[in-house]
């Protein structure tokens, strides 16, 4: 049986948590509602309630680490699918479009940015993988 | 003297055009699915402006049922955006398929698969037609006629002219985008060496209008070609269909699934069809029948009509892996918003080893298909993947390598009896089985390695090989091959089905093999030839 806090959440509040994580910004209510509609249309009506998803949304501070681990170990997991949906919803709204548009940067900045993002992702994954296995073990 | 035509795709309208203009009564039977939802939603504005301003963009970019969000891995038809989904949406229900190793795509749309065509054209030369009972000279006037019909563009006299017999009516090429221009500049700087190594590059030949042509175009460079047909600049069969509808001797009957045909004597052909609105059977009679339902659709129809269940026929399909590449010369350079989304450059590579065939190369850029689709492919946390993709997309170039294909015992189609869950759809399915030998695979990979090495000298470094499966090129042929002396499941030089007097095949099923060059333009030229011969009474 999923933890009680899963029942207290709605898809809209899940969208707020995941959207803030993906974009770093507050997600307006109409986009959260669009996320909920997308989840229903795609046949995934319930909120995240597996141990990994529940931990990620109940304690958003864990989300970067669990996402990084899931990207490596479980790219088709419910958490990654939902992050894909919120990314799609945000990308196709004018207020968030710039966060997804291609950017031209100076060659040095190009190298620094790729190196920094790779390093950050790697550190998150290293920290997230043990946590991911612990939570999966509870399933 | 009615001529019945099955299908409304590129070959169907190319065959119908000379018939209708010659005054023949033509009846075109078609399922004819259309998109009434998304096309009216898309403003005629550039991609970037829409992204930044259109509050409704999620409706056409993601779809009203969010069908544009792909959870699974990239697969055949991945380039079909929600406004193009209708092209193949009904096919699994109306055209059941099975088998192993083949991921074909079929269409029941008005305009067929060409409604979502990338519009690259590559006229075949005499070598490509070797073994066919049709010469290059036979096809040449029909290439020109179809080029006039579609409106084509390219750069005459460039290095591709050694491989392509360009039509005289060709318009100037569409402007390539910045990444493609840099590749072309690097190619020009090293041209002599690269030509000696077997590589030729140039502006893509496209069925698109770079200037006004027959009420269409010029291309608006909105970078929306995957989503809609702004300016009608890119050729779609429905542009020709609209012209044909103005003729009183042309009748278009959408909503009909042709299920079988029979010939009761010279000049008497009957086609059975299901009217999909009420699942009732109807019959249509004519003097001749032109089958243009796509190679797989026509094969299904012929095998069923002749009762040839469980009888394998050959099938060939270009194998076309894709290679995302880092175009390092683009680092730090701005990407202009004014661009098209079609093939930017075309190339050919002829290996020194004559046992390996020539390959055709198609160079694309990635932008308008959106960033989120790339995020799921990255084994990174999503925010990091998003920021990396923002940085990488301007530098990303896609190279498609198209291999030739020849028939082999492991590549075949068989019609199997079964049951149909869909009322009005015959109880059978087309089984497609396809495998290549380890030697074929090794030769293809060797050629790909050589191409990638040459592209490295142009500043492009491949990241990985994407293989969507055999059949993903959506180029199918070989099932009813054209022969000088055809058997029952073969066609003669005029496209006439063996042992029949008035049944013609006008799609790519008649080509026994596929050279690396794309089949669509040649298929249309041959269909135009078939239509012209029927119109003139030559057969």
Image (spheres, coloured by chain):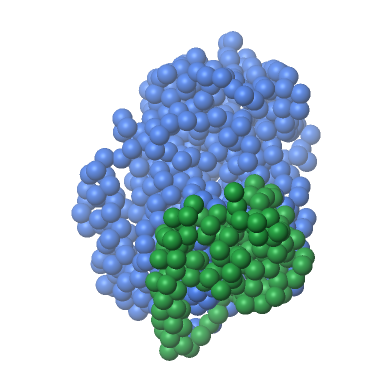
Out of B71 and B74, give the one closest to the viewer: B71
Q: Quadrant of residue B458?
A: bottom left
Residue B248 shown left or right of residue B506 in the figure: right
Q: Is residue B174 above or below residue B14?
A: below
x and y percentages locating residue B294 in the rendered image: 54, 36
Q: How many marks?
A: 0
Identified at 44% across, 55% down, the residue is A137
What is the drawing colour of chain A?
A: green
What is the drawing colour of chain B?
A: blue
x and y percentages locating residue B465 in the rendered image: 37, 58
Q: Looking at this rendering, what residue extends furthest in the top direction?
A: B264
Out of B255 and A117, give the one closest to the viewer: A117
Residue B478 shown left or right of residue A26 in the figure: left
Identified at 39% across, 71% down, the residue is A126
Out of B383 and B526, give the one closest to the viewer: B383
Residue B14 shown left or right of residue A94 in the figure: left
Q: Is residue B306 above or below residue B82?
A: above
Q: Is residue B101 visible?
A: yes
Residue B321 shown left or right of residue A26 in the figure: left
x and y percentages locating residue B404 in the rendered image: 35, 46
Identified at 43% across, 49% down, the residue is B468
x and y percentages locating residue B360 in the rendered image: 39, 55
Q: Is residue B506 visible?
A: no
Identified at 46% across, 88% down, the residue is A109
């Amino acid at each position: 049986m999923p933890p009680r806090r899963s029942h207290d959440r709605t898809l809209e509040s899940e969208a707020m948590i995941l959207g803030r994580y993906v974009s770093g910004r507050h997600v307006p209510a109409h986009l959260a509602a669009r996320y909920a509609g997308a989840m229903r249309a795609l046949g995934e009506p319930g909120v995240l309630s597996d141990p990994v998803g529940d931990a990620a949304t109940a304690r958003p501070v864990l989300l970067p680490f669990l996402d990084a681990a899931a990207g490596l170990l479980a790219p088709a997991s419910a958490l990654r699918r939902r992050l894909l949906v919120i990314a799609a919803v945000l990308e196709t709204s004018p207020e968030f479009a710039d966060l997804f548009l291609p950017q031209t940067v100076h060659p040095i900045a190009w190298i620094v940015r790729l190196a920094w993002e790779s390093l950050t992702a790697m550190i998150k994954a290293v920290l997230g993988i043990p946590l991911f296995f612990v939570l999966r073990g509870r399933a | 003297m009615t001529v019945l035509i099955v299908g409304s795709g590129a070959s169907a309208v190319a065959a119908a055009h000379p018939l209708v203009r010659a005054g023949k009564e033509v009846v075109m039977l078609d399922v004819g699915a259309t998109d009434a939802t998304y096309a009216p939603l898309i403003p005629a504005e550039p991609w970037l402006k829409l992204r930044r301003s259109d509050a409704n963009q999620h409706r056409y970019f993601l779809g009203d049922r969010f069908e544009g969000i792909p959870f699974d891995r990239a697969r055949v038809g991945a380039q079909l955006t929600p406004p193009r989904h209708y092209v193949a949406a009904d096919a699994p229900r109306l055209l059941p398929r099975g088998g192993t190793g083949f991921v074909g795509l079929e269409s029941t749309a008005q305009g067929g698969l060409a409604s979502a065509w990338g519009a690259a054209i590559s006229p075949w030369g005499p070598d490509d037609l070797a073994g066919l009972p049709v010469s290059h000279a036979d096809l040449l006037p029909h290439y020109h006629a179809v080029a006039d019909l579609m409106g084509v563009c390219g750069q005459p006299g460039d290095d591709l002219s050694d491989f392509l017999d360009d039509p005289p009516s060709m318009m100037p090429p569409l402007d390539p985008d910045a990444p493609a221009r840099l590749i072309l500049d690097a190619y020009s700087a090293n041209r002599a060496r690269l030509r000696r190594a077997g590589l030729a590059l140039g502006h893509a030949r496209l069925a698109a209008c770079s200037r006004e042509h027959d009420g269409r175009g010029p291309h608006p460079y909105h970078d929306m070609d995957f989503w809609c047909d702004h300016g009608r600049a890119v050729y779609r069969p429905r542009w020709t269909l609209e012209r044909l509808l103005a003729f009183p001797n042309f009748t278009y009957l959408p909503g009909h699934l042709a299920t079988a045909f029979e010939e009761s004597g010279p000049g008497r052909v009957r086609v059975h069809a299901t009217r999909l609105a009420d699942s009732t059977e109807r019959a249509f009679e004519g003097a001749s029948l032109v089958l243009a339902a796509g190679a797989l659709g026509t094969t299904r129809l012929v095998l069923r009509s002749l009762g040839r269940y469980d009888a394998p026929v050959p099938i060939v399909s270009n194998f076309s892996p894709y290679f995302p590449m880092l175009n390092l010369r683009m680092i730090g350079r701005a990407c202009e918003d004014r661009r098209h989304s079609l093939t930017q450059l075309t190339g050919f590579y002829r290996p020194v080893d004559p046992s390996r065939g020539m390959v055709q190369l198609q160079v694309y850029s990635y932008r308008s298909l959106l960033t989120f689709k790339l995020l799921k492919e990255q084994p990174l946390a999503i925010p990091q993947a998003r920021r990396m993709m923002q940085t990488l997309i301007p530098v990303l170039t896609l190279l498609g390598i198209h291999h030739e294909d020849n028939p082999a015992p492991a590549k075949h189609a068989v019609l199997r009896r079964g049951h149909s869950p869909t009322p009005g759809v015959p109880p059978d399915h087309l089984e497609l089985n396809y495998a290549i030998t380890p030697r074929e695979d090794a030769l293809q990979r060797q050629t790909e390695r050589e191409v990638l090495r040459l592209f490295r000298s142009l500043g492009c470094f491949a990241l990985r090989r994407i293989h969507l499966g055999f059949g993903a090129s959506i180029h199918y042929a070989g099932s009813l091959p054209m022969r000088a002396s055809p058997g029952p499941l073969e066609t003669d030089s005029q496209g006439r089905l063996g042992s029949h007097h008035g049944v013609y095949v006008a799609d790519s099923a008649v080509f026994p093999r596929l050279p690396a060059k794309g089949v669509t333009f040649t298929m249309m030229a041959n269909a135009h030839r078939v239509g012209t011969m029927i119109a003139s009474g030559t057969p």
